[in-house]
Amino acid sequence: MNNEQPETRGHSLPRRRLFQGAVGGATVGALAVGASWGMDASRSHPADAADKDAIDLTTQYPFYDQAEPAGIRTPPQRYSIFMTFDLVDGSLRTDLQSLLARWTAASAQLMRAEPIGQVQPSSDAGVGQDTGEALGLDAASLTVTIGLGPSIFDDRFGLADKRPALLRRLPKLPSDNLTPETSDGDLSVQVCADDPQVCYHAIRNLARMARDTVQTRWTVMGFGRASAGKGQQTPRNLFGFKDGTRNISTGADFDKYVWLKDADWMTGGTYQVVRKIEMNIETWDADRVSDQEHIFGRGKTHGEPLSGSVEHDTPRFAAKGKDGEAIIAPTSHIALAAHENNGGIKILRRGYNYTDGINEFGQLDAGLLFVCYQNDPAHFVQLQRKLGAADLLNEYVKHVGSGLFAIPPSPKTGHYIGEQLFT
């Protein structure tokens, strides 16, 4: 949980064969248990209409010919599914090439609210190419973001000389409690949309069309976006605090911290870090709110830094109270993550809350699907080493999943994602 830097005082799955339960089984179970997927949280707490994000389900985003990949600068949608895949044993270079080409074409169609093939076969013996559950639904701001893991560039496909310069497995971090079943992967796909059925349809069909080439590795279904885009109100994480108040929002910061420049075939792309962070929600809920605010360094209701008055006040980390102690604890979440305290480093947060229902102890199995983008993964590593070693929040969270992926630039019409790898 990084780069969530507030501002004023005021009050998985085991690996399994594709779709033999990955999206269709255990994940759907999480969908049923996670009732939040079917709710608009804003309806639960009345607020002024002017304070709510406007949702237009007819909104479409283009996939081809863009200055940057889809689903990154795009204002965060309400729902997300993140899934990783491994190429099956014996896959050839041409299999990977064909998969990326097919995913590219299908992603463009899905983002236009078009089926990826016939739903109703002409023959009674035919199988539909598109599963059909999104027929009649609008695009709902759907985006598809496809990533390449470090393992793609091992000795299987002869791509070692095309490995992006900074693409390596993340190093061991102080906060790690990772399992292989919820980490890494050859490929990542994140779909986001303002309609959960549109979102589900997209990941289901992208995975289904690749069943002979890949197997699913791990997946997380997200809801209630956990960071804001430009013009959006700041959402809340499952601890009840506003999340992402100081997120990257300006074009200058995107250019400086997110997009790759002079990076050969990756120019215009970026790096995606994904962390599955479990929250100890029952223990957190039993803590007094004043202690929760001390841990975050922000007021719970309004999101103001403890040294300020309103949410977007700049935190004053040197400010002291009457007792001579820092008003914002140096080991609070916002103090450790603040760019002022990290040599100016910023990363783009684009995460989601998630729930997997109830764990083996009968407690809520939920947390944060933390997703961030940066032009140098070392920026995330630097922040997380600091947070993982000293953050007061560590008592209540556990990092159980992790991955680093290269996000190629947007393809031109008639071309496909990662095409430069094969030339």
Image (cartoon, rainbow, N blue to C red):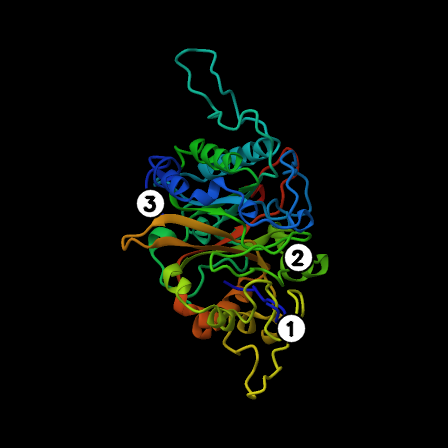
Compare marks 1 and 3 and give the one earlier in the sequence: 3
Judging by the rendered image, the residue that carries numbered circle 3 is 15
Compared to 35, does 394 lie above or below?
A: below
Q: CA distance from mark 1 to mark 3?
A: 47 Å
**Residue type for callout 2:** Lys
Q: Position of residue 264 (x, y in %)?
A: 62, 53
State whether residue 47 appears in this view. yes
Compare marks 2 and 3 and give the one earlier in the sequence: 3
Label 1 crowding class (10 Å Cα cut-off): few <14, some 14-19, many 20+? many
Label 3 crowding class (10 Å Cα cut-off): few <14, some 14-19, many 20+? some
Label 2 crowding class (10 Å Cα cut-off): few <14, some 14-19, many 20+? some
Q: Residue extending furthest left?
A: 360
Compared to 4, does 88 lie above or below?
A: above
**Residue found at x 47% / y 32%:** 205
Please indicate whether residue 94 sits to the left or right of residue 249 in the image.
left
**Residue type for callout 3:** Arg
The quadrant of the rendering that contains the C terminus is: top right
Judging by the rendered image, the residue that carries numbered circle 1 is 308
State whether residue 423 appears in this view. no
Mark 2, secondary structure of its residue: loop
**Residue type for callout 1:** Gly
Which of 258/284 is in front?
Answer: 284
Mark 1, secondary structure of its residue: loop
**Residue found at x 43% / y 65%:** 171
Mark 3, secondary structure of its residue: loop
Please indicate whether residue 360 sits to the left or right of residue 403 in the image.
left
Q: Position of residue 115 (x, y in %)?
A: 55, 26
Q: Within the image, what quadrant is residue 144 found in?
A: top right
Task: Give the tally of numbered discs.
Answer: 3
Judging by the rendered image, the residue that carries numbered circle 2 is 261
Q: Position of residue 72 (x, y in %)?
A: 60, 50
Compare marks 1 and 2 and give the one earlier in the sequence: 2
